[in-house]
Amino acid sequence: MTDLGKVSHFLGIHVDYNLETGTLKLFQKAYILLKLARFNLSTVASKETPMRLSVENTDVKELPSSIGDLQCLEHLTVGENKHLQVLLASLGRLKQLQVLEVSCSELKELPASIGDLERLERLTVYSTRLQDLPSRLGDLRGLKTLVVRSEALEDIPTSLSRLQSLENLLLEGKLVRENGETAAEFLPDGFTHLTNLQILVLISKRLERLPDNWANLKKLQRLDLQCPEVFTLPDWWEMLPELRSMGLSCLSKSLTGRCGGMAALQMLEVSRCRNLTSFPDSLGELKALHGLRFSFVVILLAFPTLWVN
């Protein structure tokens, strides 16, 4: 038997050990390089940047422009940064970004370059000062979820109608433009062209009327409305064949219009409608309805007659 000294390689594995510290390390770099060469991947760039980044609970006033150099970043969270008011244009260089979550109370605007995030699938924005959204929002053709909550939100761009991959939409804010002392009707008809939309939530204390034509929303399965000034649900009640769940909150007046065409509706929730006195009688035509909940509906005088029968 011959002593060949310390083992450095064994079956393609590099051996590194330290007798003083009592450590042993095994490396397969040679094996990995061999496999890369076999599949013609020897020259591919390695990932040296993080795929997920979270910037939360800091006092920063702006993010560094170098954040746009993180070419492999897939998930970016910017949350609870109370002094952050704007996001830099360099954000648009994050070509691999799939999820962008922003929760900053002082945020005033989103950069137009957000439209360059061609792989973005989810965008959530929480702020108290954000008034409008950039028109290039419509360039996010792969966006599936859009959540925007801001007490000051007024302007929703008509380019929203180009988001044909959008499945989930939540908008909270004024949703009306200020014209002197008069609040004009605002919610654009464009969002009714989102043919793949499945969940829609609208929350507004100022919105008075909803768009009339909802015929394109044939895949809509859940609808939640929290709009105290909306008192007429027009004929689109009859245009939502896949709607399974509907929530109506804070409505201040009696509802009119037909609703018997929602053949798939299974759950209806009505809450905090303190001045609601009646519902359309056609509600009794909803044969699939098996869940009904009323809460804090103080002066509802009677159920529709078809329910009683």
Image: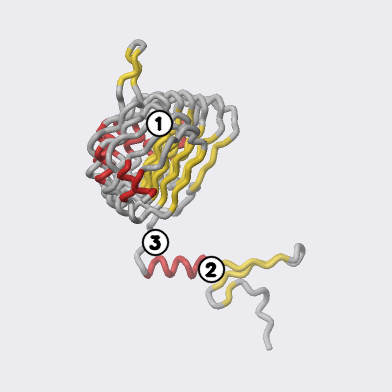
Residue on which disc 2 sits:
28
Callout 3: 10 Å neighbours few (<14), some, many (20+)?
few
Q: Earlier in the sequence, mark 3 or mark 2?
A: 2
Which label sits in the foreground, 1 or 3?
1
Determine contact: label 1, label 2, CB under 8 Å: no
State the separation of the CA atoms marked 1 and 3. Answer: 58 Å
Residue 227: give its label: 1
Regarding residue 146, the answer to whether it shows in the image is no
Which residue in the rendered view is the most extreme toward the bottom?
1
Q: Position of residue 96 (x, y in %)?
A: 39, 46
Q: Secondary structure at mark 3?
A: loop
Give amino acid for label 3.
Answer: Ser
Coloring applied to the structure? secondary structure
Residue 95 position within the rendered picture, expressed as x and y whole percent measured from the top left: 36, 43
Tag 3 residue: 42
Q: Give the residue type at disc 1.
A: Cys
The image quadrant of residue 141 is: top left
